[in-house]
Image (tube, rainbow, N blue to C red):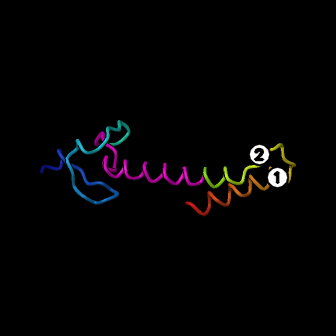
Amino acid sequence: MHSSESATCSKCNIEKPLNDFYKNKNKSNGRDSHCKKCVLKQKKRSYKLNMQKKRIVESFKVTEVGSPDDEMFAYHFSEIVNYLLR
């Protein structure tokens, strides 16, 4: 392949046709630096992690109007979950 017809994904380091990259007018070649497959893989991973975080945080939420201590606990617990699931 000619270099003008292909690009190398910076995530998987595989040379692929330009059609395998999303358009991005801010890049010099007009395409993203990650291929569509890698972008989709990352989106699925992020969605899965966000759902896990949400389930954990929801399981510890106070069901009734809680005291400020309960709200503070929920806030700090959420921060801990975010840190652990990075």
* Residue found at x 31% / y 59%: 12
Marks 2/1: CA distance?
Answer: 10 Å
Magenta stretch, main secondary structure class: helix
Where's residue 26, x and y in %?
A: 38, 39
Where's residue 1, x and y in %?
A: 12, 51
Q: Nearer the viewer, residue 34 or 83?
A: 83
Q: Is residue 68 magenta?
A: no
Q: Is residue 37 magenta?
A: yes
Q: List the single residue furthest toward the bottom.
A: 84
Q: Nearer the viewer, mark 2 or mark 1?
A: 2
Which type of secondary structure does the marked residue at label 1 adopt? helix
Q: Return the residue at label 1.
A: 70
The numbered mark at residue 63 is 2
* Residue found at x 77% / y 45%: 63
Span colored in magenta? 29-53
79 to the left or right of 69: left
Amino acid bearing label 2 = Thr
Q: Nearer the viewer, residue 49 or 29?
A: 49
Which type of secondary structure does the marked residue at label 2 adopt? loop
Relative vertical location of residue 23 with respect to residue 85 in this rendering, above or below: above
Tag 2: Cα neighbours inside 10 Å, few (<14), some, or many (≥20)?
few
Amino acid bearing label 1 = Asp
Number of residue marks: 2
